[in-house]
Image: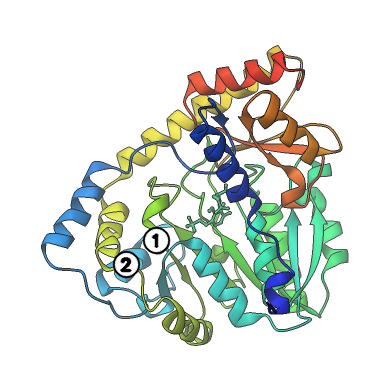
Amino acid sequence: MKFADRVTRVEPSATLAISNKASALEADGVDVVDLSVGEPDFPTPENVVQAAKDALDAGHTGYTSSNGIPELKAAIAEKLADDGLDYYSADQIIVTPGGKQALYEIITALIDDGDEVALLDPAWVSYEAMVKLAGGSLTRVDTARHDFELEPALDDLADAVSDETELLVVNSPGNPHGAVYSREALEGVRDLAVEHDFLVISDEIYKEITYGVEAISLGTLDGMEDRTITVNGFSKAYSMTGWRLGYFAAPSELVEQAGKLHSHSVSCAVNFVQHAGVEALQHTDEAVVEMTEAFEERRDLLVDLFADHGVDVDAPEGAFYLMLPVDDDDTAWCEGAIEDAHVATVPGSAFGTPGYARLSYAASEDRLREGVERLADEGYL
Ligand code: PMP
Ligand code: GLU
């Protein structure tokens, strides 16, 4: 069979591939400590589930208007205004089946063959794949050597971007490192975006999950209104991964172009799920705080457990991931860890940064203890 070049130049999602491997081992009766996929282990808040049931009972089962139901777009505009992004009207929002689809539509709408896109490594696996699918070329800037901070990497970013750059992707709090970028770092990004006239995707899907710091929305910085595309979703903050609900807000002309992709591919996000999304945005403050507090305790526990085994890891300020320094051949390390210790992790090289394994601490404290013990017992620490 002949396949299109665009699809043969990408690999399957490494995060999902490893999580599938963990599930396959579990199906064979193996007890796997799965620290691979980034998925909160809490149930979706009850009131959100109820809102979906109510929406089904009320007959909200047909197509919706392609870009989303007015109630949800209004609630999203309000949430964005609370984040300081008070300039987005509801018409500048597209509701998508997951943040991933939002990113896919944006990148596909903006990037042509050979167009240059800059990423800050380590970068979430799907950015690279989406750029490659669109035919774009990648420029990658390493932040790992600066302990995942962006400010000290700004000189490298300045060297990497030029007037040829079309797009930069910024993800704070970040997957896979959990870093939350400082205002100074984001101002550095803004200065470069203005100087070279490029657009920036601000992927804020972990914005609600921070520990003692605030994640600043890039679009709140002076000069960024017309060049920021803000992406967010419900998967992480409200523990709604399987509901598939996300969105983006962007300058109107991009909404118009990306909206064509949206209407010709997914038509709309699921109707009753959109109704549940309104409830998630408006009535879950307490649940989000509780989940975030639990993540913080788990993060501290994991850092302490590694310290007990002589491995010092800085505590990340956001999201629920931690990059563990491992062998140079991180792929072999992760394969060994799952086969010998039955602990599933994702190699840093999948995110452009070899020499690390990404651990998701969206797992119970018992499982985290068990995972670290197994890694230590099998000689992986
Ligand atoms: N951005 C980042 C950085 C992520 O880690 C994820 C996780 N899946 C997404 C976007 C997309 O999430 P979803 O499609 O579940 O909204
Ligand atoms: N974003 C999560 C992760 O990095 C979920 C899997 C995915 O969508 O890649 O593990």
For disc 1, the neighbor class at 10 Å (few under 14, some 14 to 19, many from 20) is: many
Q: Position of residue 317 (x, y in %)?
A: 60, 37
Q: Position of residue 325 (x, y in %)?
A: 78, 32
In the image: residue 353, left or right of residue 377: right
Decide: marks 1, 2 in contact (CB < 8 A)? yes
Q: Cβ of disc 1 within 8 Å of ligand 1?
A: yes
In the image: residue 246, left or right of residue 106: left
Q: Label 2, on which residue?
A: 270
First in residue order: circle 1 vs circle 2: 1
Q: Is residue 122 visible?
A: no
Q: CA distance from mark 1 to mark 2?
A: 8 Å
Amino acid bearing label 2? Val
Q: Residue at x 54, y 27 (%)?
A: 30
Q: Quadrant of residue 113?
A: bottom right
Q: Residue at x 70, y 76 (%)?
A: 6
Secondary-structure class at tag 1? loop
Q: Residue at x 73, y 50 (%)?
A: 350
Q: Position of residue 352 (x, y in %)?
A: 77, 52
Residue that sits furthest to the left in the current view: 58
Which one is nearer the viewer's eye here, 9 or 221?
A: 9
Q: Quadrant of residue 64?
A: bottom left
> Of discs 1 and 2, which sits in the foreground?
2
For disc 2, the neighbor class at 10 Å (few under 14, some 14 to 19, many from 20) is: many
Residue 164's disc number: none
Q: Label 1, on which residue?
A: 245
Secondary-structure class at tag 2? loop
Label count reads 2
- Image vertical order of residue 177 relative to residue 170, above or below: above
Q: Quadrant of residue 89?
A: bottom left
Which one is nearer the viewer's eye here, 347 or 146?
A: 347
Amino acid bearing label 1? Leu
